[in-house]
Amino acid sequence: MTDAATTDHWIRRLNLVQLVLAGVLIMAPTVWMVLSSFKPSFEVTAYPPTLIFTPTLDNYVELTKTTPFLSYALNSLIVTVGSTALGLLFGIPAAFAVSWTRISWPAILTLAARMAPGTLFLLPWYVMFRQVGMIGSYTALILSHAVITLPIVIWVLLPSFDGIPRSVFEAAQVDGCSVTRILWRIALPLVASGVAVSAILAFVFSWNYFLFALVLSNGDTKTLIAAAFNFIGEGSTQWGALMAAATLIALPPLVLAALVQRWLVSGLTLGAVKG
Amino acid sequence: MASISIRNLVKRYGNFTVIPDLNLEIADHEFVVFVGPSGCGKSTLLRIIAGLEPISSGDLYIGDKRVNGVQAAQRDIAMVFQDYALYPHMKVYDNMSFALELRGVPKAEIDARVKRAAALLHIEPYLDRKPKELSGGQRQRVAMGRAIVRNPKAFLFDEPLSNLDAKLRGQVRAEIKALSQELKTTMVFVTHDQIEAMTMADRIVVLQSGTIQQYDTPETVYERPANQFVAGFIGSPAMNFFPVEWRQERAVLSQGGTAVALDGDAASRLRQAGNAVLGIRPEHFALAADADGIAINVRLVEPLGSDTLIHFDLAGVSAIARVDPSLRPKVGDRISLRPQPGKTHLFDAANGQVLR
Amino acid sequence: MASISIRNLVKRYGNFTVIPDLNLEIADHEFVVFVGPSGCGKSTLLRIIAGLEPISSGDLYIGDKRVNGVQAAQRDIAMVFQDYALYPHMKVYDNMSFALELRGVPKAEIDARVKRAAALLHIEPYLDRKPKELSGGQRQRVAMGRAIVRNPKAFLFDEPLSNLDAKLRGQVRAEIKALSQELKTTMVFVTHDQIEAMTMADRIVVLQSGTIQQYDTPETVYERPANQFVAGFIGSPAMNFFPVEWRQERAVLSQGGTAVALDGDAASRLRQAGNAVLGIRPEHFALAADADGIAINVRLVEPLGSDTLIHFDLAGVSAIARVDPSLRPKVGDRISLRPQPGKTHLFDAANGQVLR
Amino acid sequence: MSDTAATLTQDRQKLEMAALSAPAVIFTVAMIAFPVVYTIWLGFQHFSSTGKQSFAGLANYSKLISDYEFWHGLWVTIALYVLSLVLQLVFGVWLALVLFHAKRLPGIVRSLFISPFMMPPVVAGMMWLVILDPSLGAANYILQSFGLPPSDWLASPSLVIPTVALIDSWQWTPYVALIVLGGLQSLPPSVYEAAQIDGASPFRTFQRITLPLLLPTIVTAAILRSVDLLRFFDIIYITTQGGPGNASNTLNIYGFRVGFEFFNIGYASALMLTLTAIVFGAVLAFNRLRGAVAW
Amino acid sequence: ADFDWMKFKGKTVTFLANNNPVAQALLTYKADFEKLTGMTLKVDGYQEQQMRQRLVTVMNANSDEVDVFMTLPSREGEQFAAAGWYADLTAMAKNEVAKEYDPAGLSQALLKAATFSGKLTSMPMNIEGPIFYYRTDIFKKCGLAAPKTIKDVEVAAEKIKACDSAVTPFVSRGLKPAVAYTFSNMLHNIGGSYIASGKSNLCSTKGKEALDTYSRLLRDFGPPGVVNYSFQQISALYRSGRAAMAFESSNELRTVMEGGARLKDTGLLPFPAGEAGHVPTTIGWGIAVSSHSKQPEAAWYFVQWATSPEVQKKMALQGIAPPRPSVAKDPEYRKWIDEEPVRKEWQAALDVLATKGSSEVGYPIVANPQSREFIGQAVQDLILKQKTVDQACADADKALDALIALN
Ligand SMILES: Nc1ncnc2c1ncn2[C@@H]1O[C@H](COP(=O)(O)OP(=O)(O)OP(=O)(O)O)[C@@H](O)[C@H]1O
Ligand SMILES: Nc1ncnc2c1ncn2[C@@H]1O[C@H](COP(=O)(O)OP(=O)(O)OP(=O)(O)O)[C@@H](O)[C@H]1O
Ligand SMILES: [Mg+2]
Ligand SMILES: [Mg+2]
């Protein structure tokens, strides 16, 4: 008994060590960022780095004072949710079709927009959306961000769909399911974890992308991320406010990730089929 | 309810031809069982009928509609998969009700049908479980249930009972048979179980390497196998084969030259052919007076309860005879056996075709 | 090579107790077969022995080492899974060689062993394929092959032959038996096939709802079932049961009151008990003179080739008799049957225990 | 007649499949067709410093071939790409496994583990700029408090690429991990039982079962990372602007500066298109690989 | 008399702003403008690089979306002017002005810097330039007086290195594109020039001396990793007390003084003189009207308001150095200046900038931004000891000659 118990124990301990190690490496800068957001601006770059300090909310107050933070956040939310939804809406069926037919050019095509440097799109899109009078509209922003979210959704879901045993789909066909039904009723629930991952990723990418908003938005539809830059500049680098902004910006994706966590812990295909 | 008709069907996987050229007519309401060695193409054929596997060439008719390109979903066929293929995310109940839901069957009726099928398959206690919480046999029964709640044009069953115990299997078998009679639905059934094949089938298709060896009623297949393959495949333990010759106006085993008593009909056929393969089923050996029969040494005894199997070597062939357990033979005993008259089979030594 | 010993084993899934309290000793080199209805806990027990399923309470010894917490990888046990669990990304060859590679067996020997197992299972042509390109039976054989290339402390087989045809199954069965004798390895084998159980086992474990009903040699289990469950479970078609009473100094069927001729021994036991359940196997009915036997109406005839089954109703019970096919009974015929003397079983009407 | 009906239905599934990918395809084409054509056109233009345009033929492309900065940028791009990709895939898979086994980790903590890539890249760059500052930064402070020699990090021409790769890996390893974690969730569990029975140690199980089964997912992650890594921009732009010297001047940084700071739009377009072609090639290669490792 | 602020009542003017302190100070009074003119001001504020990116896109698309934008004439003036993005303000600045506007009161140097081919392209919003920050306490401790010449700076650096090893003696910009800003000041002080007879002139004696001195100061007395240093790092280093001398923008005063640690021990000077005396770099943000604007007059009203003495005084009180000497002398502003000694020194330095300044940062050519790259490259090569001075200047000259030829 002791033998087995100790091996088990050691394995668990090893895991714990790795977990802590990974945690420290990954989170230290993040922690540094969050702590910095509670420091007076000049203390952020103090040397030696201060660990003990009197926390202050000044940076956050500053933030709300100098930028219409909430309305930017709302803009960001609209654009991000919109483009994530659009990405999922277009991407899920496409990923399914690509996985089913094993014809991969549509997946590669959607990625094409990600292969080109984003700056390449600025001018043409500005011209294009101006042509139809959509500069500054949420629609233009959502569409442009969907170009980012779509390939993420497709590519993240591809291996998940590939992993579902074919015979489950076949059973559904025999049951009288159309392809679309198979997708929604059978395949989708089985790739829940993939959908969760792709949704998180699409959200984060869209949320943090500023280049397109730079030219396609106007003062009213500017996204939060563009505001973060405003704290960097000659004579105006406000470290504290920047860190506070970054902390607040990182918060929604973090909350989203925590929310969809439970979809990440699945293992549904167990027991479906032999083989 | 529909007939199924397969014409000049060819199926290949890449270079590998599973079915070289197959013709088969299954009448409306008929209960047909496919048997054949593992890998001979039974599942493939079923999947082709279901519309899950494209045809390399040839035609497939269901009713009198050519369905070559028709999608599985449109064929209105129910199928039990060899590997179950349950929906992992659905509870047992939903696995079974899914197809009905799709067809817009009213809730109450769905419920009634699912409950009935569940009762029939003894899976009522598990309706609320997910497939992964079931045992192998239970999963198989769910797969079965998923098919039988429906009322399709045809049922296709791919070894649906292989993981059930004899008793349950007997029950379910009877239920399927009753179902087929009640619904008058065409049924195609793949099984490795001879008893299943014999008791359920209106007709049996014996397949080998994708070609039909015989397509006839169970009795005919058993009693008048078309060739040596069928003869050897159907029946358990398998038929014993001995090369025989017509020598000096009597039938003798080619190896060793022991004389075998054949009835007149068989003897005349052998005389004509000169040499042949003689087939005798284990249960068609009778104990004989010493002079009359062939003396053998008991090499192994397998008591099955209801019968006892005697293994022995004869003319270079390892053979089996099935005898009454009351006989209690012992290893090393020397006994004398002879084929029951009228129960012997003769096959062409070259191509295995039965000699008639 | 090792004995397996299970003491006071309890296994629960959540609230659901699969195995309430189980004790079992499997000797070194022994070939034990588990049988029991679907869902009775056979696979669970196998998985516990393999170390794949944690124990709720109790102890498990392999050899004389307590292995409760030992990981499966350390137990040195080979197992064939009911659902195959092949490695989908490996070719058949690699599926089979993997375990040997892990053990650092030299390449040449690996090759020899894999080739041998493949030959034995008739899967040589598929060594280069991936599992998804195989038929059901072929996959099952690969699963089998993966186990038998090894030389472990014990083999665990979970219905390893269920998808094979009778002929192949017979061959593989014989090979496994030979293997077990050659390697002298402890074997635990789950099957639904009675013939498999009877022919292979040194001892049979009959399980029901996670409890052992009988643990004995095949003959004993067949001939002297410990209780009505075992009696009904072993044998195919199943034993017929009729409630009987001792009335006016003779045995009569409780329902209808028809007299049954029992041999002296059985009669005295029934007299003592007053009432009981009479068990007669289908093959233990003999045709009787009209006066002697019990007259029945043939309800259904099932010709199996080697035998014929007659279904009939008696004393409210639907019963089966197995008779010689030469009899050619027809539905509606009225015939007279009697139990063969010394072949009847009597069970306590209340708890099903055999009356001795 | 029945034949045509049959063919119609036969094609129907193909049609349905096409219908499923149609929205994505149409949307993408609608969004990128114009920019791509426009950029290709720009690539053939010459912009004089006075803003006059003229047709330049292949001049921009021939300039490319003789442009030392281009070749240097290509080298920097590839070095950074390979280094970062390897780091991120290796540690991403590791992190995914660690997280996968830490089943009882509360959701919020788990999402903290993947938080770095949720941080805006600009902020991440700024942050690392401070942390890695040779005089002021926490990194050297920590090194020195352990008695280790300080390092110049981003300021050393020989260290800048590894350092930038490390920063990028800090940020994006969790992203790879998340993708791989999604893949891990969908692996068939029974296979692991079989591996245990076969006597595979945890390491061997990983090497022979998990890794090959995960390969399609890993390749996917590699594809998604490739399209970003080959266009390496944000972190360099924030931290070194391509320096010291041109030690971290990737093609994308170079192209951006040529276009938006030096206003040579024609040449910038040629640069960007070349870069796009390189990314496209990488994606095609990986897509091939994806087909090869599918199971 | 007949100037009517309300002339364009009801119109909307869009202003693309660089979200820096200058714009921030200005936009505090946005409501005043709207009240005064009855116009609506739509502000679109971005960080500098982003603003430029947006501007380039908008202008390239010939869009009228932006009426007014902020610009750095010293950097992109030539380029934007060549591309025709600036509306010509010459006439409007003469005729369309309110009486109190006083265009002549603006820094003439800055106005000149914003004039290209005779066209006035933008009005100055502020004045700024690199100045010399030094630690009076350390200088005292090491027995040093405030440096008067570049030589003094070198000597001081040497001494400080010996006397207080914990601090970095001298810090300035080392980041490639940022170098030109400070380096130009040194070059001009030494008496060098970028271009002589149409050729790049870095390999002249003075040019080489400037390159050598600048890079030597940073290499021998600067912080490790100075090649990545720009205003952020310099301010942070100096503010935390770890640098004795810093050569950095006047704008950074606020950042440097944050937290108050440097308030009492900092001295400010124009960068010490060279052989050519003081030729400080003086630049300023300008505010320009887009040539694509559909309402240049209305836009001009905003420009005029933003650069009016009244508004600039208000901005000055928020620490934005005014490009109008008159404002710098305003009593209210003086009072604010006198509140802190550093402010006094700061203003004194700025006064020198205003009078003696040159706005030449990098090469006075269309490809100015690109020219800064090569200057930076040369300095970095020297700091990193990858080239000799001769090599570095020769390489730079070669590249810059090609650039000049493109003009
Ligand atoms: N994960 C689970 N959760 C709940 N119940 C389970 C789970 N796994 C198995 N069971 C139940 O435990 C019982 C025993 O299962 P087991 O697989 O051992 O049966 P078995 O004897 O192998 O049956 P079969 O012959 O059908 O394979 C079954 O009733 C099954 O429903
Ligand atoms: N995807 C495939 N690629 C290549 N060969 C295949 C593929 N699928 C099946 N086969 C081969 O086709 C033959 C027929 O397979 P099929 O599944 O129809 O056999 P089966 O008669 O159902 O056998 P079993 O009784 O073992 O289930 C087999 O030899 C199998 O190896
Ligand atoms: Mg099959
Ligand atoms: Mg089981």
Image: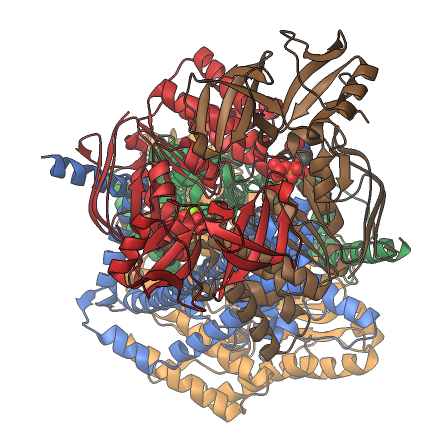
Chain colours: A green, B red, C brown, D blue, E orange
Left or right placement of residue D162 versus residue A132 in this view = right
Q: Quadrant of residue C63?
A: bottom right
Nearer-the-camera pick, D291 or B120:
B120
Total number of numbered discs in the rendering: 0
What residue appears at the point 70 percent right and 75 percent down from the top-left corner?
Answer: D151
Residue E11: x and y in percent read 32, 32
Residue D110 can be seen, yes or no: yes
Percent position of residue C175, x then y? 59, 60
Can you name the residue that lies furthest to the front here?
Answer: B291
User: Where B45 falls versus B104 (above or below)?
Assistant: below
Comparing D263 with B258, the one in front is B258
Q: Could you tell whether E359 is left or right of B323 in the image?
A: left
Quadrant position of residue B68:
top left
Q: Is residue C203 above or below residue C172?
A: above
**Quick one: quadrant of the N terminus of chain B?**
top left
Q: Residue furthest right?
A: A2
Q: Is residue D134 left or right of residue B66?
A: right
- Pick the residue in front: B294 or E114: B294
For residue A82, above or below residue E273: above
Residue A202 percent across, percent down from the top left = 48, 45
Residue B142 vs C130, above or below: the answer is above
Foreground residue, C248 or C197?
C248
Q: x and y percent of residue C293 in the render?
A: 59, 18
Q: Is residue E232 visible in this depiction of the protein?
A: no
What residue lies at 70% left-to-right and 80% top-to-bottom?
A: E221
Quadrant housing residue E138: bottom right
